Amino acid sequence: MSQLSKLMDQVRPELEPLADHTLAKRELVVKERYLVLLLANLLEHGALTEPQTRLLEMLLASVQNVQSLVFYIQQAAELDKHALRASLEILKKDKALSNALIFDLLVVLRTAGALADAQMRQLNQLAMLLNMRNEEIYKLVYCCMLLLNGKVEMDSTPCVKHIYAEPSFISMIEAKAKAENIELGNNASFKKPSTSNSWLNSLSTFTSNVVLAEITKIEENYIAKKNLTLMKVFPFRANQLIHGNDFIVRAVRVGFYKRVTFPKGIVIEICKPDWSPFTWSENKNDLVAKVLTFPEGLDAWIPLFDIKDKK
């Protein structure tokens, strides 16, 4: 690599930074145990590629106030049983850190190509040691593929929250989908496994919560006073990253409105594009959209999920 290329790699984290990592506000000992474990897993099957190295430099910058990548590579080479156990004991008690570790590994490993069977087994073993459930890993894998590809072709959409405009109660539903051939680029794909134990390269079934959108009575002068906008069309585009919003729409009965509450996530599917008055059901749920909500711990990557320019 030329000197200029090295300099460009050094300034890239400053010019195109990741968002703050979930580690950013943790104690230094937690940061270092996490990063050593991350590097130990990455180096288990060979040296880092240049794209992986550049990505890790950006990741370290997002963690903040840590040592160089070379330092953690050296520490990873010296990882022993006692240090590994201490690191796992810290991470398994913190869902955000467990999610972040698996997701960071998935993203960095995938920059070098399709995951080998040995890498799958290793991730599987690590997830088991972190007490992670299958459905949690399925969702992380889905998010990783969505981040890298911009879309995931499926027979239906998994792991999403269904947003309803509904009359003042919350119900629970299940969103189910099966993974077939999920294209990941570079002529690689995740295929539905032939055995139930090979869960890490599948998406299987997810259970999601209904997002509340309640019918409520609001005085007209309150709407004007609060400068509320009565939406007439769906306010987001498909694949848009949203940060959590409330919208008011006029319901069937005069004087009554529906409050549609969006979580932070990605709009996967628009189910009700027309929000004009009197298009809403009076006494039953109106399915508005399907939104992929993020597992906790993906803070560094979330801004990159806005995939409007990807087809």
Image (tube, rainbow, N blue to C red):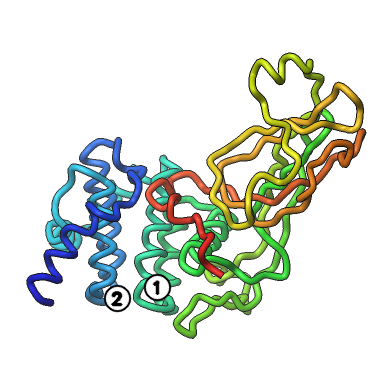
| Residue 208 placement (x, y as % from top left) | 68, 47
Task: Name the residue beneath numbered marker 1.
Answer: 119
Label 1 SS: helix
- Determine which quarter of the picture holds residue 71: bottom left
Task: Name the residue beneath numbered marker 2.
Answer: 45
**Which sits earlier in the primary sequence, circle 2 or circle 1?**
2
Q: Quadrant of the C terminus?
A: bottom right
| Residue 77 placement (x, y as % from top left) | 17, 64
Residue 299's label in the rendered image is none
Q: What residue sits 79% from the left and 42% below the top?
A: 275
Tag 1: amino acid: Gln
Near mark 1 (Cα within 10 A), the count class, few <14, some 14-19 or many ≥20, is some
Q: Are marks 2 and 1 in contact (CB under 8 Å)?
A: yes
Q: What residue sits 55% from the left and 76% below the top?
A: 190
Label 2 SS: loop
**Alpha carbon distance from label 2 to label 1:** 8 Å
Left of 90 or right of it: where is 279?
right
Q: Quadrant of the N terminus?
A: bottom left
Q: Would residue 87 be visible to someone looking at this image?
A: yes
